[in-house]
């Protein structure tokens, strides 16, 4: 997890710089690991609710232990199927993990369901991971078509060094 804080937290901060200047009220952070990005989100946005999920029980335990004094809810969950009501979150973040989801299409459909109509899905990761794990989606136009098929739209793509960020909205 020290690697995450040293290498990937800066990538998450860079990714967040591409969000529009607006207040987010209900935030979901997918694949929280030790909770460092979720904690950063809680500091950057004074949201009404910030929830961090991870499929790993150990990760959730560590996140709760490290960030128990903050107004963050950590929960063991899989993004493929959640129990959140439709239109629950106006910002959903996935840093360095969407390429590991067992069912990318199903996960994106679930994200679409729980994302508000004007909400944003922010995916930030190393581009080399996209090329390795999702080579068929490495070209932004192709990824945009894939998102279009699940009712999402690719709003913006930015790259710097080996980082890539996808800003995604509902169609």
Image (tube, rainbow, N blue to C red):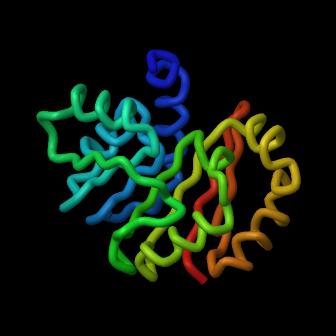
The image shows residue 65 at horizontal and vertical percentages of 22, 27
Asked if residue 7 is positioned above or below residue 105 in the image, the reply reads above
Q: Residue at x 23, y 49 (%)?
A: 73
Q: Which residue is drawn at 48% across and 66% down?
A: 81
Quarter occupied by the N terminus:
top left
| Residue with the most extreme left position | 69
Instruction: State the image quarter where residue 136 is shown.
Output: bottom right
Residue 46 as seen in the image, left or right of residue 153 = left
Q: Residue at x 53, y 56 (%)?
A: 122
Number of dots carrying numbers: 0
Asked if residue 57 is positioned above or below residue 170 in the image, the reply reads above
The image shows residue 120 at horizontal and vertical percentages of 48, 67
Instruction: State the image quarter where residue 70 is shown.
Output: top left
The image shows residue 57 at horizontal and vertical percentages of 37, 37
Nearest the eye: 55 or 29 = 55
Residue 128 as seen in the image, left or right of residue 30 = right
Residue 162 as seen in the image, left or right of residue 136 = left
Quarter occupied by the C terminus:
bottom right
Q: Which residue is drawn at 65% across and 44% down?
A: 100
| Residue with the most extreme front position | 57
């Amino acid at each position: 997890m020290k690697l995450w804080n040293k290498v990937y937290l800066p990538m998450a901060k860079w990714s967040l710089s591409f969000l529009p200047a607006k207040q987010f009220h209900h935030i979901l952070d997918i694949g929280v690991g030790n909770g460092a990005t979720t904690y950063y989100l809680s500091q950057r946005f004074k949201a009404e609710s910030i929830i961090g999920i991870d499929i790993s029980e150990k990760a959730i335990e560590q996140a709760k232990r490290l960030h128990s004094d903050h107004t963050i809810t950590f929960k063991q969950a899989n993004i493929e199927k959640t129990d959140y009501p439709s239109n629950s979150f106006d910002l959903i973040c996935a840093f360095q993990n969407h390429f590991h989801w067992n069912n990318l299409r199903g996960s994106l459909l679930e994200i679409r369901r729980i994302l508000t109509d004007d909400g944003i899905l922010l995916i930030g990761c190393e581009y080399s991971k996209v090329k390795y794990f999702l080579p068929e989606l490495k070209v932004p136009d192709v990824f945009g078509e894939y998102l279009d098929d699940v009712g999402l739209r690719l709003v913006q793509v930015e790259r710097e060094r080996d980082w890539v960020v996808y800003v995604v909205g509902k169609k």
